Image (cartoon, grey):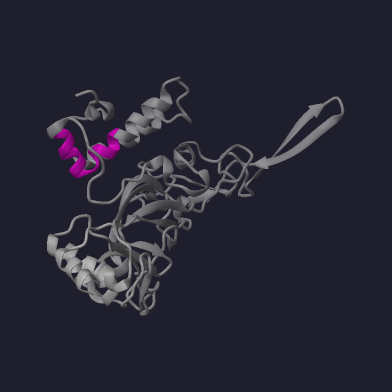
Amino acid sequence: MSTNYYEILGVTREATDSEIKKAFYKKARELHPDVNKSQDAEEKFKELNEAYDVLSDSNKRAQFDRFGKVSGASGGYSYVDIGDLFSGGFGMGDLFSTFFGGATPGRTMRKEGRDMGVGLRLTLEEVATGVKKELVYDRLAPCDSCKGTGVGEGGCFVECSRCKGSGRVVTVQHTFLGDMQTQTVCDTCSGTGKTIDKPCADCEGQGRLPDRQHISIEVPHGIRDGQQLRLKGYGEAGIQGASAGDLIVTVRVDQHTRLKREGDNLHTRVDISITQAALGATLYIDGIMPAEKVEIKVPSGCQNDQTVRVRNKGLPVFKKESRGDIFVHVTVIVPRSLTKHQQELLEELAEEFGDDVASKKTVSQRIKEVLS
């Protein structure tokens, strides 16, 4: 094995899920680049995140235990890397910066949770019917031990001893121009005016911890590529019980092998013979809905690349009962080889139309010419 995830986390192969999670929290506090200034801190933190991603997922862990490696995500949905979870360029460093380092000196701590973003891939068939999907992603979630309050057992919020509840600290600097007075955000309470006398031991008073979330989402039929669904309260948890951000799900629709989507309409192509083009025909193709057969009525005299429109057989309109149309583009196939009888029939047809063709005339045609 080129990488031993158990060694990276510092646990044995018999470690429980709880032990793995605790080991991750402990190592994360030590290796996070915001607090660890060694040159390889960032690389080691990425390895730590990869190890936790594998060992905290039962399917991936079983795969790793058996083969020594993990071949992609499990469960049939796309894995979302923790560095790509946030919209607006918000990345891994921001995910843990507040958790580990608190607010930046001189600035009020943001207590509300940020919005998060994940991608969801769908097939065109899933778009047509609507689908229920499971999402797996990492976020700062409410701490179970303190129920998201940040307060430990027997603790409570008290007035900040440094700023006396104002959230601001006044400092005086003596210069040759006189005393200069400045007012800054209190770095003890981060501008809130309150502290916790007995913070939660697990989250250190933050009220939230990194955790893996599993949620189910109902995707309505007819959704379009790039369209977003907002799940309120499923983003980053707020500090000490403040409101959570939202989870924004961006839908990506895979290309279909046979059908091309344009809005709520579908386009496809069918091949017909020259006789079907001349005489007309009724064909049946598979529709986008389960077990659906779409009837295509090819008109007589149909030309190559002509389009036949079938109404109300396209995709269902988003959150409505109506459907778009399907446009069938016809390709007339000319046979590359003919039997002797087929050739004679076509030559007779060419003579009937007065067409000059390269084929030799049959014996019966020559006799007719002599008699005439």
Magenta extent: 51-65
Nearest to the observer: residue 308 or residue 59:
308
Q: Position of residue 191 (x, y in %)?
A: 60, 46
Is residue 278 among the parts visible in the rendering? yes
Q: Position of residue 56 (x, y in %)?
A: 24, 41
Is residue 287 among the parts visible in the rendering? no
Q: Position of residue 143 (x, y in %)?
A: 36, 49
Nearest to the observer: residue 77 or residue 268:
268
Q: Residue at x 13, y 60 (%)?
A: 340
Prevalent SS, magenta region: helix
- Above or below, comparing residue 362 to residue 90 in the picture: below
Q: Residue at x 30, y 64 (%)?
A: 332
Q: Position of residue 284 (x, y in %)?
A: 22, 72
55 magenta-colored = yes
Q: In the rendered image, which quarter contains the N terminus?
A: top left
Q: Residue at x 19, y 44 (%)?
A: 58
Q: In the rendered image, which quarter contains the C terminus?
A: bottom left
- Above or below, comparing residue 273 to residue 31 in the picture: below
In the figure, residue 131 lies in which quadrant? bottom left
Q: Is residue 312 left or right of residue 370?
A: right
In the figure, residue 268 lies in which quadrant? bottom left
Residue at far top of view: 39
- Above or below, comparing residue 207 to residue 20 in the picture: below
Q: Residue at x 76, y 30 (%)?
A: 173
- Above or below, comparing residue 66 to residue 319 in the picture: above
